[in-house]
């Protein structure tokens, strides 16, 4: 996770990624990259410069118009060096395709839409996901438009995309077992990919974290450390991922002879409330000696409460947490974590979606990422 650029949101309602970075406009306000925050757009000259065209790029690179056009359309038959030269030249002259003209000629928008869950409590999930997708579309003809979604039961965002044809393909996150957004996309034959699996009989493209394996490894780790009573802390029973984790937890604990306890999966508890829960748990007569947690924010809050309540981390209680940032290890370096590489997930989702847009069958576009272990004690 080291080496990724620092990135901070400011009043983000929606945003757009172009080759080489984020585009700025009246609807897109964002601070970006290199530990700096852009507070206002650069001054614009009163005299507009001449618009860069395909001919401009062809003259710069010495390539033919047809080669430049093919490269900017993501032509995979071209050499990587050629595509890189074209992308660099396009960026240097500020080339922006006339999307209205492209749409009239081809029916394509050259846009990928990310419908991003706005209530996720995984630290840095949105940042790494957007950066991964941005990296994935770099050098292609596609732009990224992000739509935050705060109600997973709503299909309004997907319906808008479909009715107005504002994108050529869609990425959605945090899927439910019978997700209505997935059903609507399938019914309308729109190319899409999900970050998460579903239980639909009809296959669709997806990329998912292998959460069952995460759970098995976490319980086995705690059992190997001598834990006999393990609590699972997991939120949001609306997702298919929740049910995958719970089943794997009960199955693995039963195999190892470990007693289990489930945290009440409320989704609206604040970190302060989670800390109070940890403090109360420290004084409970049936306090577990091991915790599996699927959220860094919840894990940090609970551990803080347990310590405040007098429990010694690593002695009285052990913990294994899912990791999506470097924050938890910095605060509690002795805690074992299992990482999901969300940046790589964004890249993989983009790869699958572009292949689906090109017509590849859905059943060939289903992948899982394996957990990355960080055992620390």
Image (cartoon, rainbow, N blue to C red):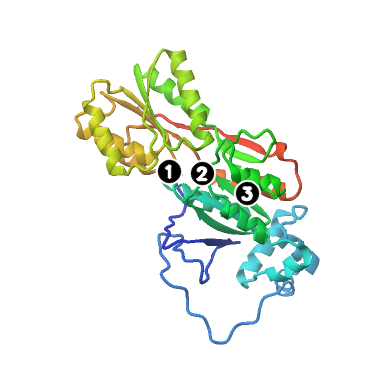
Residue 101 numbered tag: none
Categorize mark 2 by other alpha carbons within 10 Å: few (<14), some (14-19), many (20+). many
Query: Which badge, 3 or 2, is on the more N-terminal residue?
Result: 2
- How much space separates mark 3 and mark 2, taking CA atoms? 12 Å
Cβ atoms at labels 1 and 3 below 8 Å apart = no
Q: Name the residue under label 1.
A: 122
- Total marks shown come to 3
Q: Residue at horizontal 34%, vertical 32%?
A: 335
Q: Name the residue under label 3.
A: 350
- How much space separates mark 1 and mark 3, taking CA atoms? 21 Å
Categorize mark 3 by other alpha carbons within 10 Å: few (<14), some (14-19), many (20+). many
Residue 363 as seen in the image, left or right of residue 302: right
Helix, strand, or loop for circle 3? Answer: helix
Q: Residue at horizontal 66%, vertical 47%?
A: 185
Residue 342 numbered tag: 2
Cβ atoms at labels 1 and 2 below 8 Å apart = yes
The correct choice, above or below, for 13 with respect to 341 in the image is below
Helix, strand, or loop for circle 1? Answer: loop
The answer to whether any part of residue 112 appears in the image is: no
x, y (%) of residue 287? 27, 23
Disc 1 versus disc 3: nearer the observer: 1
Residue 40's quadrant in the figure? bottom left
- How much space separates mark 1 and mark 2, taking CA atoms? 10 Å
Q: Residue at horizontal 61%, vertical 70%?
A: 92
Q: Quadrant of the C terminus?
A: top left
Closer to the camera, 21 or 125?
Answer: 125
Closer to the camera, 235 or 367?
Answer: 235
Residue 35's quadrant in the figure? bottom left
The correct choice, above or below, for 192 with respect to 73 in the image is above
x, y (%) of residue 36? 40, 63
Closer to the camera, 281 or 34?
Answer: 281
């Amino acid at each position: 996770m080291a080496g990724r650029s620092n990135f901070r949101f400011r009043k983000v309602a929606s945003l757009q990624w172009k080759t080489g970075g984020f585009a700025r406009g009246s609807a897109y306000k964002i601070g970006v990259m290199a530990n700096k925050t852009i507070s206002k757009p650069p001054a614009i000259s009163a005299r507009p410069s001449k618009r860069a065209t395909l001919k401009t790029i062809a003259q710069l690179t010495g390539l033919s118009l047809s080669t430049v056009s093919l490269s900017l359309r993501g032509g995979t038959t071209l050499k990587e060096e050629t595509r890189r030269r074209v992308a660099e030249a396009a960026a240097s002259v500020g080339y922006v395709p006339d999307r209205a003209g492209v749409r009239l000629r081809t029916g394509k928008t050259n846009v990928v839409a990310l419908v991003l869950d706005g209530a996720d409590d995984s630290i840095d999930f949105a940042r790494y996901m957007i950066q991964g997708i941005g990296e994935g579309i770099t050098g292609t003809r596609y732009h990224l438009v992000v739509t935050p979604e705060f109600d997973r039961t709503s299909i309004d965002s997907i319906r808008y995309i479909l009715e107005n044809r504002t994108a050529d393909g869609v990425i959605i996150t945090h899927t439910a077992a019978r997700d209505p957004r997935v059903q609507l996309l399938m019914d309308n034959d729109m190319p899409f990919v999900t970050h998460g699996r579903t239980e639909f009989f009809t296959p669709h493209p997806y990329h998912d974290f292998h959460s069952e394996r995460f759970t098995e490894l976490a319980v086995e780790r705690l059992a190997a450390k001598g834990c006999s009573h393990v609590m699972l802390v997991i939120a949001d029973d609306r997702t298919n991922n929740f049910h995958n984790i719970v089943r794997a937890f009960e199955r693995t604990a039963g195999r190892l002879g470990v007693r289990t306890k489930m945290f009440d999966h409320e989704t609206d508890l604040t970190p302060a409330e989670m800390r109070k829960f940890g403090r109360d748990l420290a004084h409970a007569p049936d306090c577990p000696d091991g915790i599996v947690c699927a959220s860094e924010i919840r894990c940090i809050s609970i551990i803080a409460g347990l310590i405040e309540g007098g429990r010694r981390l690593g002695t009285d209680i052990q913990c294994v947490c899912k990791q999506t940032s470097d924050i938890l290890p910095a605060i509690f370096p002795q805690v074992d974590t299992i990482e999901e590489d969300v940046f790589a997930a964004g890249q993989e989702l983009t790869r699958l979606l572009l292949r689906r847009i090109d017509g590849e069958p859905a059943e060939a576009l289903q992948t899982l990422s394996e957990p990355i272990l960080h055992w620390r004690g």
